[in-house]
Amino acid sequence: MQNNYQQQKLGILGGGQLGRMVIQAAINYNIDIHILDPDPNAPCKAIANQFTVGSLTDFDTVYAFGQNCDIITIEIEHVNTEALEALVKDGKEVYPQPHLIRLIQDKRAQKQFYKDKGIPTADFVLTENKAEVMQHKHFSPAVNKLGREGYDGRGVQILRSPDDFHKGFDAPGLLEKLIDFDTELAIIVARNKRGETVAYPPVECLFHPTANLVEFLFSPATITKEVQAKAEAVALDVIQKLDLVGILAVELFVTKEGEILVNEIAPRPHNSGHQTIEGNFTSQFEQHLRAVMNMPLGNTELRMPAAMVNLLGEDGFTGEAFVEGLDEAMAQKGVYVHLYGKKITKPFRKMGHVTLLDENLETLKKRAFEIKELIKIKA
Amino acid sequence: MQNNYQQQKLGILGGGQLGRMVIQAAINYNIDIHILDPDPNAPCKAIANQFTVGSLTDFDTVYAFGQNCDIITIEIEHVNTEALEALVKDGKEVYPQPHLIRLIQDKRAQKQFYKDKGIPTADFVLTENKAEVMQHKHFSPAVNKLGREGYDGRGVQILRSPDDFHKGFDAPGLLEKLIDFDTELAIIVARNKRGETVAYPPVECLFHPTANLVEFLFSPATITKEVQAKAEAVALDVIQKLDLVGILAVELFVTKEGEILVNEIAPRPHNSGHQTIEGNFTSQFEQHLRAVMNMPLGNTELRMPAAMVNLLGEDGFTGEAFVEGLDEAMAQKGVYVHLYGKKITKPFRKMGHVTLLDENLETLKKRAFEIKELIKIKA
């Protein structure tokens, strides 16, 4: 018997939209998936083979959950890594490896890793409290990040001038020089247990001006072949130096001088790879499965230029969600709507996304902005 | 509020692979799907929002099932149409319309419809029993079909010479002249309640030599633009004359003289449209949802040439299935494996399919035959 994917139960910590899209990919392989999430109405609830309500950060809950699985992975990195390590000792396979999840949970350890391994990143200093932030006004303009618990733009702030430094986080964090970047890229890389690696072509991210969330993404990025090759080499270098099994989203700055700097990494499917479902030969969600289940990795080439538009809950609306403009969008060629099954909308909550395909990059961008105006998530 | 897809519960009669792929498409729209199937382990079981075990042909079961739904559709046509008509009287929406399901259930009524409406089809005669088949030896070579219950090659036989006519079905059926066709095409067409229609580009089907099942499919078909236009016009003519809401698979013969004849139709997603998931802008499964839920229809153009290889249970093996050759296939660019989640394999049982993408039609065909040799479903 050459494969036993169908005999292995895959446990995923987290049942949000990322887990949901992993399940969508897993249906084709008939993989038995068990989800753990604290929210009884999490997006994965209706489509997981088994769904357990429970804390992702509680040792006993995660440990008990893992006992029923053969392979365990994550769709969010804020999980109890001690429980995962205990599961590894029990003979379970856990990917990404628990010590790497722990490293990445802590932005300070992450930054230190780049420095130790010679991976290019913005200059930084570790700070223990606000007083220490205040001592580094010469970093201005700077980005101040909390070491832990930052997510989707929380725990990150820009200190534009020395006068802002009194707002510094009064907890362990880091202060890094604000990069005057030309482009913000993201690259998904993957690595399986056999050590095979692949990189997706870089994409370009546009962030929401205030919510600090990806709002638009364009694939491919409009960069030179040299910058692309350099960025891919850096991203592959990171996953290889980590020895990580799974997929890794690498966010990169391209400076005005054409230098590549690693900003942050996430060891799981990522918002910057949603367009791969329709835009590339293998989606990031299937690639994640392939990597953690030690299948051969899939081809990462573009099938067609793609844009991704995040459908964020409209500011000012909280309550049962409804979607405006869906019909008009669906009537267009190359529009793919993904709703995450979240009943309640809140300002800037990620409620879904749209992928848009268009051979012409100019038209693609224009249409992406139009889709954003067309589809509104209200209550 | 412009749409209420998320507020409508869609009931599907049948929980096999076709329903499973409809659910896969529905997840993106967060549509609440309720499945009825007699098999407690049907392919839809794990991913339907609700799954009811029950007979599709029993009035009370189908009627009770429909009471809990807003819109009801099918993934198999052998269902109790009286119950569906009662549900329509109760104000439920049922697509395709029950009288059309009844028409299509009966191959005799289907043929008569073509004749009455001027739709080109092979010459035929209706026969009540074997004696009547024997009276029409001048139809030789002929195809003898049972009026009802034929499915996946059952209830169909070829009578090659007058000497074969004693094998004629001794039940209501039909006898039609065997068409010496050049190509066997299939076209999926769709129509929504608003009366919008679309046609997919024709595909070419290769049947298994003995099992009478589609074994390979190539998209696009290698036909002239004129034949393509004619075939699409015939297929659209059929759905319009039926006034059908939903999707319709139209199987067509192209005779050696370039004439188009309708062979059979199926008012649901069909094996001849599986490659649309990866090969076209909108999959047939999403199109089915769009049609029955009165959404705008999706673009049907090809994204890339595609082949579909049915993964049939290997002859001589019955029991718990395992898949040979999966790893080697998955390592190839443009290979998409779809396993249907059936535990038990039987000779020629449809266990899954593979879609293959390749820009070059010659390479595509060569690779499709190789995939067939590579992946084997055994027990």
Image (cartoon, coloured by chain):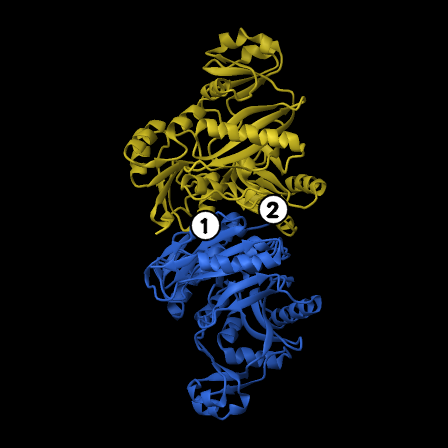
Chain colours: A yellow, B blue
Q: Residue A184, located in which quarter of the rendered image?
A: top right
- Residue at 47%, 29% in the rendered image: A240
Q: Position of residue B3 (x, y in %)?
A: 58, 50
**Residue, far left:** A90
User: Type of residue at label 1?
Assistant: Glu
Q: What element carries label 1?
A: helix
- Residue at 59%, 29% in the rendered image: A231
| Left or right side of A337 for B16 | left
| Left or right side of A80 for B258 | right
Callout 1: few (<14), some (14-19), or many (20+) C-alpha neighbours within 10 Å? some
Q: Position of residue B107 (x, y in %)?
A: 51, 78
- Residue at 54%, 91% in the rendered image: B138
Q: Is mark 2 on a helix, strand or loop?
A: loop
Callout 2: few (<14), some (14-19), or many (20+) C-alpha neighbours within 10 Å? some
Q: Residue B139 carries which label?
A: none
Q: How far apart are marks 2 and 1 (CA)?
A: 22 Å
User: Which of the image's four quarters has the C terminus of chain B?
Assistant: bottom left
Residue B293 in view (yes/no): no
Q: Is residue A51 above or below residue A147?
A: below
Q: Residue B328 carries which label?
A: 1
Using the image, name the chain to which the residue with label 1 belongs.
B
Q: Is residue B16 above or below residue A340?
A: below
Q: Residue A303 carries which label?
A: 2
Residue A116 in view (yes/no): yes
Q: In this view, does B191 lie above or below A334?
A: below
